[in-house]
Image (cartoon, rainbow, N blue to C red):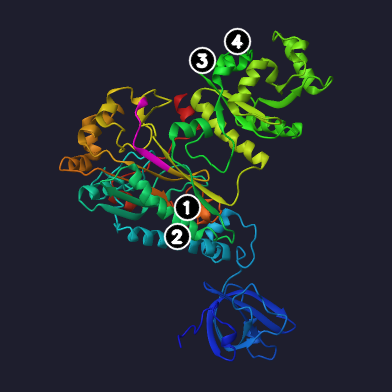
């Protein structure tokens, strides 16, 4: 028999009744029932109820041991008394009567409860993460993560991919975020960078002829913390040679589809897995206000700029913005006509809280002018008074869609009908409007779309909706400098190759794509630029001259001069996939060890101050930022 256990704490069944067993684990709970002491003993496999009889010589000693102390017990397996079985435990039909007990390690008073959830704040949970991880929910999520990664590896191996490990200490590379730098002791004044992604190395593996690469890759980005972003994260990174975009999709869609179908019922509720047709980036931005839309939200954004430009629309607040190059976006909210006024007021208040002047709307209804005194008749009277050129006789036996609300009075009957037709409005629908410059309008309309959806309670449940977003722009204009820069990954092949780079850079489409699921970007990738002359031109447009290109990417550029295959790939964020499958809104809930939102590890005490000797060895010194008041005194 093993020195510590013959069985795990989740293993005993009725078949074991009568056996003498040895178990080891943590004291989960203690209960004193009239001198009989019950101990729930827990390990990673489960929980077993153990009993110390009232006449046992162990009773006085065991009573002193606190919860979360580690025990090894030897005892006899017995049936539980009728009516005391616990159907929630796999071991719930039996219990172990303790004959011997050894306290392997005693626990101090706990800073947070393990057996029962409490409201311990994140700082306490992360400082005592080893205790937090003992909780059943955290234990399950960490195991889920392990199982998902194991499944990913198996599925990639089954498709003929080889697993590689690429360097952690490497050179800086423009991946859209700040690098973490590591000073070199042997090369004073020079720094390594922790990889934001193994981009160049995996492309070099394709140049080396390995054809199919994958890695569970650690990545590091010095970005501000938020719920769905960490400084250190992991991705399922892959690359393939001699492929086009659809080959990547056909290879990786079954992998991710299989992962989600395998673990969809992890929470005990089945979720459907649905893949929607590919969608161009421009369409996603126009219709959903985001390049990572949640397609469970049925609301769609429409462009109605041309309608508000018409002469029979007198809403000058919008017209002034349109004249400066702005746009008007509309969001149809079906069947909200019976909502109280507070529904619309709360949305208006929300918009103001987001920095917008408000969220104007029109509420549509079928008008029957024969119903004298009706709200619809009053609206039509107002339209006639407003000067739409109609008379009451024109509305005899007339039934049409009319609008009411803060914006409706500024639109003619024809303009209201045009809006109605454009967005597909029906009786009882509302249409909300956003007006701003195009990029800002899209972003705010996307947020408004989600807010309206949630207030209506119409977001589809019980489904994972996936879609590949394609045809990303290669370049964008920097809002601060006005210069042209890469929009996303600078290593993507422009669609059309060199010819595409001879025109307006802002019209160039990249062979780049993302995979989105339920409002999260879970993957980004592209068909790579493997031609040195095209890469030089692409980087020159973004302001990188050849000398900079050679200095920063000389290794990969040089490799391309010796025969590079067409290749492409992508990387799926493992942490976000686990977060979605675990139904957790925060990435820190699906990691074993993680830093807080300020990127501090309160358990290990990092980041920490280096010693003087360490600084001397690295030939560096720390210059603390000057506080504002100190700077003002110096300038005075």
* Mark positioned earlier in the residue sequence (1 or 2): 2
Q: How far is disc 2 from disc 4 in space, using C-alphas?
A: 59 Å
User: Residue 121 lies in magenta, yes or no?
Assistant: no
Q: Position of residue 479 (x, y in %)?
A: 43, 25
Q: Residue at x 63, y 24 (%)?
A: 420
Q: Secondary structure at mark 4?
A: loop
Q: How far is disc 3 from disc 1 in space, using C-alphas?
A: 42 Å
Q: Secondary structure at mark 3?
A: loop
Q: Are marks 1 and 2 in contact (CB under 8 Å)?
A: yes
Q: Position of residue 358 (x, y in %)?
A: 64, 26
Q: How far is disc 4 from disc 1 in space, using C-alphas?
A: 50 Å
* Mark positioned earlier in the residue sequence (3 or 1): 3
Q: Secondary structure at mark 1?
A: helix
Q: Which residue is mark 3?
A: 324
Q: Please tell me whether mark 2 or mark 4 is closer to you in this view.
A: 4
* Mark positioned earlier in the residue sequence (2 or 3): 2
Q: Is residue 146 above or below residue 224?
A: below
Q: Are marks 3 and 1 in contact (CB under 8 Å)?
A: no
Which residues, given as a range, are shown in magenta? 507-514
Q: How far is disc 1 from disc 2 in space, using C-alphas?
A: 9 Å
Q: How far is disc 4 from disc 3 in space, using C-alphas?
A: 17 Å
* Mark positioned earlier in the residue sequence (4 or 3): 4
Q: Which residue is mark 1?
A: 577
Q: Residue at x 31, y 33 (%)?
A: 495
């Amino acid at each position: 028999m093993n020195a510590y256990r013959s069985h795990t704490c989740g293993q005993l069944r009725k078949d074991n009744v009568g056996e003498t067993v040895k178990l080891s684990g943590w004291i989960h709970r203690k209960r004193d029932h009239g001198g009989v002491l019950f101990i729930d003993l827990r390990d990673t496999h489960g929980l077993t109820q153990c009993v110390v009889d009232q006449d046992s010589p162990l009773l006085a000693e065991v009573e002193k041991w606190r919860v979360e102390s580690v025990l090894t017990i030897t005892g006899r397996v017995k049936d539980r008394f009728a009516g005391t079985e616990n159907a929630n435990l796999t071991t719930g039909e039996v219990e172990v009567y303790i004959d011997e007990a050894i306290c392997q390690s005693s626990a101090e008073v706990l800073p947070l409860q393990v057996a029962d959830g409490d409201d311990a704040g994140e700082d306490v949970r992360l400082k005592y993460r080893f205790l937090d991880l003992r909780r059943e929910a955290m234990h399950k999520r960490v195991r889920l993560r392990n199982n998902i990664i194991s499944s990913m590896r198996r599925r990639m191996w089954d498709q003929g991919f080889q697993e590689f490990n690429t360097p952690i200490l490497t050179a800086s590379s423009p991946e859209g975020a700040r690098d973490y730098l590591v000073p070199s002791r042997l090369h004073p004044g020079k720094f390594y960078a922790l990889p934001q992604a193994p981009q160049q190395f995996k492309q070099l593996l394709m140049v080396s002829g390995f054809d199919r690469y994958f890695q569970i890759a650690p990545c590091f980005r010095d970005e501000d913390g938020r719920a769905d972003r960490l400084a250190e994260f992991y991705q399922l990174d892959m690359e393939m040679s001699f492929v086009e975009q659809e080959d990547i999709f056909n290879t990786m869609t079954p992998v991710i589809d299989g992962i989600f179908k395998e673990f969809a019922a992890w929470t005990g509720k089945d979720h459907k897995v649905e893949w929607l047709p590919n969608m161009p980036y421009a369409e996603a931005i126009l219709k959903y206000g985001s390049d990572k839309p949640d397609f469970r939200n049925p609301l769609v954004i429409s462009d109605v700029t041309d309608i508000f430009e018409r002469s029979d629309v007198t809403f000058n607040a919008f017209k002034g913005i349109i004249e400066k190059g702005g746009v008007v976006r509309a969001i149809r909210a079906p069947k909200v006509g019976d909502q109280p006024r507070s529904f619309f007021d709360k949305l208006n208040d929300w918009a103001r809280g987001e920095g917008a002047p408000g969220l104007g709307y029109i509420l549509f209804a079928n008008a029957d002018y024969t119903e004298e005194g009706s709200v619809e008749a009053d609206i039509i009277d107002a339209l006639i008074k407003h000067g739409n050129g109609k008379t009451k006789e024109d509305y005899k036996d007339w039934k049409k869609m009319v609008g009411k609300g803060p914006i409706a009075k500024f639109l003619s009957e024809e303009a209201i009908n045009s809006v109605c037709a454009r967005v597909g409005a029906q009786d009882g629908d509302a249409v909300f409007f956003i007006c701003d410059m195009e990029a800002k309008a899209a972003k705010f309309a996307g947020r408004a779309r989600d807010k309206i959806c949630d207030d209506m309670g119409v977001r589809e449940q019980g489904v994972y909706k996936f879609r590949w977003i394609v045809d990303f722009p290669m370049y964008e204009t920097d809002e601060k400098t006005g210069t042209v820069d890469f929009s996303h990954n600078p290593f993507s092949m422009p669609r059309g190759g060199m010819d595409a780079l001879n025109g307006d850079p802002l019209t160039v489409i990249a062979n780049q794509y993302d995979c989105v699921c339920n409002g999260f970007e879970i993957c980004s990738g592209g068909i790579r630029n493997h031609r040195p002359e095209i890469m030089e031109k692409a980087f020159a447009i973004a302001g990188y001259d050849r000398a900079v290109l050679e200095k920063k990417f000389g290794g990969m550029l040089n490799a391309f001069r010796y025969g590079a295959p067409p290749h492409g790939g992508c990387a799926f964020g493992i942490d976000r996939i686990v977060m979605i499958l675990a139904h957790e809104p925060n990435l820190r809930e699906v990691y074993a060890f993680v830093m807080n939102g300020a990127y501090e590890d309160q358990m290990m005490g990092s980041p920490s101050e280096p010693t003087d000797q360490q600084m001397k060895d690295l030939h560096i010194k720390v210059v603390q930022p000057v506080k504002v008041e100190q700077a003002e005194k110096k300038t005075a």
